[in-house]
Amino acid sequence: MSEKEQRILDIAGVKIGGRLGECPTVLIGTIFYEGHRIVRDHKKGRFDKSAAESLIRKQEEMSRLTGNPHIVDIFGSTCEALINYIDFVSDVTDVPFLVDSISSSQRIPAMRHAIETGLGERAIYNSIDYSVKEDEITALQETKARSAMILAYNPSNVWPEGRTEILRGGEKRQGLLEAADKAGIENKLIDTAVLDAPSIILAAKSIRLVKEEFGLPTGCGPSNAITTWKNVKKGLGPYAYDVCIATAAVLTQVEGANFVLYGPIGLAERAFPACAM
């Protein structure tokens, strides 16, 4: 790692960032995702509350046992669902959470709700990406959001250098860091973007480049590639899925990941021990 000062953020008591080993890796599990069996109605945000609380408690327990801090990634298909999920999760646990949805039209109102109900210190917008428009930047500024993920995916250059390019920007394109500054984001977390299994190593290598240039807390979600890899569950034996989930997470740590989105929150018992080791 270069001599670039590495920033450490404190988001509602969870420290994220610094040089390799300076702070424990923060692990982030996703709840209420598409296909999550505990969800009964993805549009309305109706779900099995007992099962959801048990999953969150298990992540808390694994965090306590290993010393790795944790964050909950709350995914919602609609604004109504996302708000319902935020209200529930914020009552169950005191840790920060990601306000996560495919579209900004769902994320912005949910982020506004979180801030208006006193959860602004814990809410992390997920995410600002290459498709960001001025209306999203303005809306974020108006909500007074403090924290956000910045997805460093560059469709014009998928190699590690492309991640730094999309963050930096240039004469013809606004960089994502500039967009985040305009939106008033103080706490910037850089996600180096995993799309499929081969891209895990590209995202991991990108972590080092991003930290060397910008000094910001950086990580990624390698589990996305594993959970969508059909053969790993059917053709490679009974242990392949769990082994690959754990290995993918650890691989990103070797390159200096400050946080890892390890996938469905039910995988906490696989991810935490591997990353703690």
Image: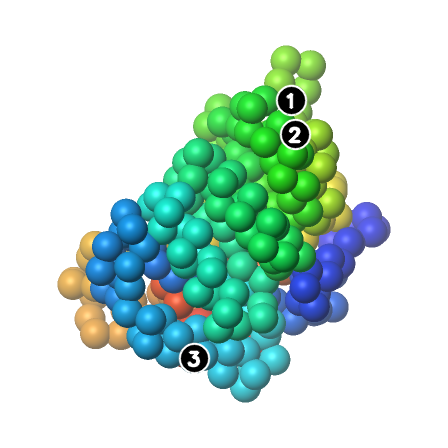
| Residue 101 in view | yes
Specify the quadrant that holds the N terminus.
bottom right
What residue would you read off at disc 2? Answer: 179
Name the side, left or right, on which 95 lies relative to 226: right
Q: Residue furthest left?
A: 234
For marks 3 and 1, give the CA distance: 41 Å
Q: Dot 3 lies on which element?
A: helix
Circle nearer the viewer, 2 or 1: 2
Q: Residues within 10 Å of mark 2 (few under 14, many from 20)?
A: many
Q: Residue at x 49, y 46 (%)?
A: 110
Q: Which sits earlier in the primary sequence, circle 3 or circle 1?
A: 3
Q: Dot 2 lies on which element?
A: helix
Q: Position of residue 241 (x, y in %)?
A: 29, 67
Circles 3, 2 touching at the beta carbon (< 8 Å)? no
What residue would you read off at disc 1? Answer: 174
The kind of residue on which mark 3 rests is Lys
Circle nearer the viewer, 3 or 1: 3
Q: Which sits earlier in the primary sequence, circle 2 or circle 1?
A: 1
Q: Position of residue 85 (x, y in %)?
A: 41, 58
Q: Dot 1 lies on which element?
A: loop
Q: Which sits earlier in the primary sequence, circle 3 or circle 2?
A: 3
Q: Nearer the viewer, residue 141 or 260?
A: 141
Q: Which label is found at residue 58?
A: 3
Image: 43 above or below 48: above
Name the side, left or right, on which 175 lies relative to 251: right
Q: Quadrant of residue 134?
A: top right
Q: Residue at x 22, y 60 (%)?
A: 40
Q: Residues within 10 Å of mark 1 (few under 14, many from 20)?
A: some
